[in-house]
Image (tube, grey):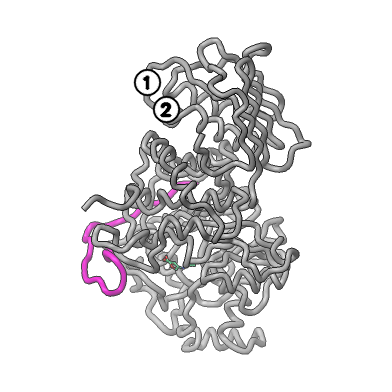
Amino acid sequence: MDLIPAPRSLRRTEPGAAFVVDGRTRVDAGPGTERTERWLRGVLAGAFGVGLPPGEGAGALALRVDGSLGTESYRLTVRPDRAELVGGDPAGLFWGAQTLRQLLGPDAFRRAPIGAREARLPCVTVEDAPRFAWRGMLLDVARHFMPKDVVLRYLDLLAAHKLNVLHLHLTDDQGWRLEIRRYPKLTEVGAWRTRTKVGLRESTLWDERPHGGYYTQDDIREIVAYAAEREITVVPEIDVPGHSQAAIAAYPELGNTDVVDTTTLPVLTSWGVNPNVLAPTDTTVRFYENVLSEVLELFPATFVHIGGDECPKEQWSASLTAKNRLVDLELADEHELQSWFIAHFDRWLAERGRRLIGWDEILQGGLAPKAAVSSWRGYAGGIAAARAGHDVVMCPEQYVYLDHRQADGPDEPVPIGFVRTLEDVYRFEPVPAELTAQEAAHVMGTQANVWTEVLDSVRAVDYMAFPRLAAFAEVAWSALPAPAERDFAAFSARMRAHYVRLDALGVEYRPPGGPRP
Ligand code: TNX
């Protein structure tokens, strides 16, 4: 059956026998099953041209929600005369439908009709539940803008892998991608750059084409609704106080104006850690409160990501305004100033019923109890956070930065970071062994991050994300043994079927074994 991610249990009950889905099949949909019903109807209408009208009785495909099963869990029972999918909640039901689609065979991943007019579900019993509640992918739409349709397509791809969080990195030095009504220049100016450096520091090549784009608030509403239909939460990231040059280019008063002439700063065209950071002033704080107010209207997610990474402190050390701030606030140094900045938004979000999440740099200086941490510089930040009682999303760059190459070789994209193979990702363990059970309970889950400095199109993103995202999904969902005991050979064998599904979805994955010489 070659399911990916692997379920908790799968039994073939009547080998050779199947439940046939055709023009006569009815859907018997109980309360709370509407999203899955709509989604299944779409899938079966695509390649198979099967309508799935509502109806009960023998030969029906039954959908149920039954709270006695756990959160996000499901049970699928297929017999020749009846198929029943039960979810512990609407999300569990939807994940069960993803399994059902894989059981229907690769044509179920096509949209164009194949003229079959029927599909066959093998007789099985599947019982399944996720290991982690947060199973995410970050898409960096700031470094290279990805049009709305690309984001919608990625939501489909996440859903097919039972991933349930899309972390949208919406702002950075190189672009601001979200319409903010109160500050139109953020996108009029901040969403556009004149050219783009190809590759990182050592490169001297430039792509001389202007680049840019942004999501209107209507686009975002559409993305969020499309995600919700697929049981996916969209977590927005507004990165402060570093990685903010695009905002400063639009509103120069946000920068350290007594140190640099911020009126001449462009939207950044090259990459790396950038000294032009936000000024730690009330003007900046009010500005970002106003930005976040609009963000909260658009994104219903509990968590709002506030960045907090890679903020060099040189300008604050040189700035009289920042120095005065230190005195006013009775802070020891610039690091405490960064903590003050983050702590302010931590409180501000908490007052509005939301929770702050940020990169592990935000740990310096202490956090409100409900703030959470994305551990990216290895495990250390995540371990410290969990020990301090904070929730953690494990996304160490050594394992799950999918912009890093999956092999060495001349055909791979511009080298950045580590080489991380499919097997490395498969053996990634989100919960470090040194945590006690109580500390480990703070690991909400894990996330694969797709940064796009060197990925300038959806095809480039596909190549880097796949097949590794499939291995990542199994790490995030399935109850795998310890890394050394994981059966990578068995996973690879199942992947053969999964590549056929990805082909049907039109995903331009890195071919198994790499590009042909
Ligand atoms: C580090 S992860 C960054 C990103 C880069 C990435 C490239 C993080 C919080 N900061 O700004 O895009 O490395 O791999």
| Labelled disc at residue 114 | 1
Residue 311 in the image: above or below residue 490: below
Work out whether mark 2 precedes mark 1 in sequence or the reverse, and give the earlier one: 2
Percent of width and height locating residue 121? 54, 24
Q: Main secondary structure of the magenta part?
A: loop
Residue 57: image x %, image y %?
68, 11
2 and 1 marks in contact (CB < 8 Å): yes
Residue sitting at x 53%, y 17%: 21
Q: Name the residue type under label 2.
A: Asp
Q: Residue at horizontal 72%, vertical 68%?
A: 436
| Left or right: residue 32 compared with residue 474 | right
Identify the residue at horizontal 55%, vertical 39% (top origin): 225
Does residue 427 lie above or below 109 as drawn?
A: below
Residue 505 counted in the magenta span? no
Compared across the picture, whether 435 is left or right of 503 comes to right
Ligand 1: quadrant of the figure: bottom left
Q: Which mark is residue 107?
A: 2
Secondary structure state at the residue bearing disc 1: loop
Identified by mark 1, the residue type is: Ile
Total marks in image: 2
- Visible residue check, residue 290: no
